[in-house]
Image (cartoon, rainbow, N blue to C red):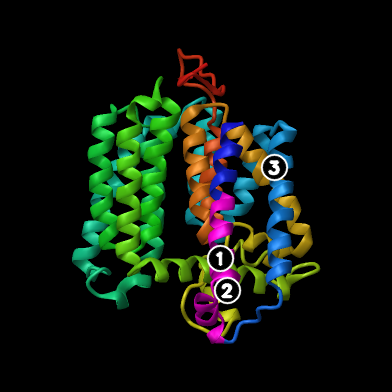
Amino acid sequence: MRGLKIFGLSYFSYLLIALYANYFNPQLRDILYSRGFVPSYLVWGTAMALLFFAVFALGYLSDLPLPPMFIAAVALVVSLYDFPAAFLVVCLLLLAYKLDLDPLRRFSSVAIALSLAIPPILYVLNGVPLLDPSLRYELVGPLVLLALLGSLGMSYSQLPLMWKTVLLGAYTVVFLLGSFRSLVALIYIVYLLDVYFTDINPLRHKTAIAGVLAALFLIVLWMSGGINVLLIRVGFTFLVFHNLVRLSLPFGLFHGMLLFSDNPRYLVGQLFGTTTHYTYFFFGQAVADFGILGIIEAFFLGILLRRSEDSLDSMTLALSVMVYALDSGIDAMLLLFILAAVLFSKPKAGTQEDIGEPENGTVS
């Protein structure tokens, strides 16, 4: 149950921070609601967040099997959001699965190379978003994809910890220049989970882990411009969520269009009268698309997390993406990476992976 415990801890930590900014801190609350948003559905939004998590946990605890053909069908449907590119990639993954190949492990080094080499090229050709904020959203699509590829590469790579630490430093620079703190956080989450899940005695690295967490906090704080700005950022995401609840109950507002949009955060921003990108919390897409029926999607996501635990590296990727999506919200691209992790979540050849609870600092 480590996947559910880690996700639950992350989920409720995020929720408490969001509620602090939305309700318990009057100064932050006044700033958040100065844009004309409706505060009256905060209680409804919180109730929906708790309900959806309960259904997510129920899906996880149900331990239901997911036939590969079902995962393949869902992946093909979801890939239509970016036809034909995403559809062709999914078809190639399914062909690899049919041939009993594992491209996620086999090409992890390629994923790392691409995710490190392409961003500098983008910065040379287009400019550096950290130095020119007007470029930020011009590069958001490719940078998110490359960060996910880097997460995949880090999750499945068999490189020793020392080299993964070097990669962590390189990714910090690459995605810091892109100005998206969430992408920097994603790589750090992958690194920390990889150490925790794969090290026989992760407690021996507790000082290093604490140092990495401190570094991540300081980087995010610096990129945010201070603790109050960071709190407002988290609070605003939940503000968007509970206003989506207000607009989407009982049976949804977008009816699937948000999931199949190639730019869902821009679509949510347009809904609230802006041309910028609004993040919408982990269950924001499910609520906005399907209303209360979005609990079916929450149940499915819980099953996906449980099924990803069939191998350590697949769980690292799926769980990292889900924790990252706490702020950004689920979209088609993130869901495809989770589905790929589940589809190829079989132990490496010649090993017997057991993802039991740690006892006395060791993995049983």
Element type at mark 2: helix
Q: Residues within 10 Å of mark 3 (few under 14, many from 20)?
A: many
Classify the position of the N terminus by image quarter: top right
Residue at point 67%, 36% (across, down):
69
Residue 320 place in picture, x, y as percent: 48, 44
Element type at mark 1: helix
Residue 48 visible to an observer of this rendering: yes
**Horizontal arrangement in the rendering, residue 165 relative to residue 56 (left or right):** left
Q: Which residue is mark 3?
A: 57
Q: Which mark is residue 20?
A: 1
**Horizontal arrangement in the rendering, residue 291 relative to residue 86 (left or right):** right
Classified by dominant secondary structure, the portion drawn in magenta counts as helix
Between discs 1 and 2, the one toward the N terminus: 1
The amino acid on which the numbered mark 1 sits, given as a three-letter code, is Tyr
Residue 282 place in picture, x, y as percent: 59, 57
The amino acid on which the numbered mark 2 sits, given as a three-letter code, is Val
Q: Which mark is residue 268?
A: 2
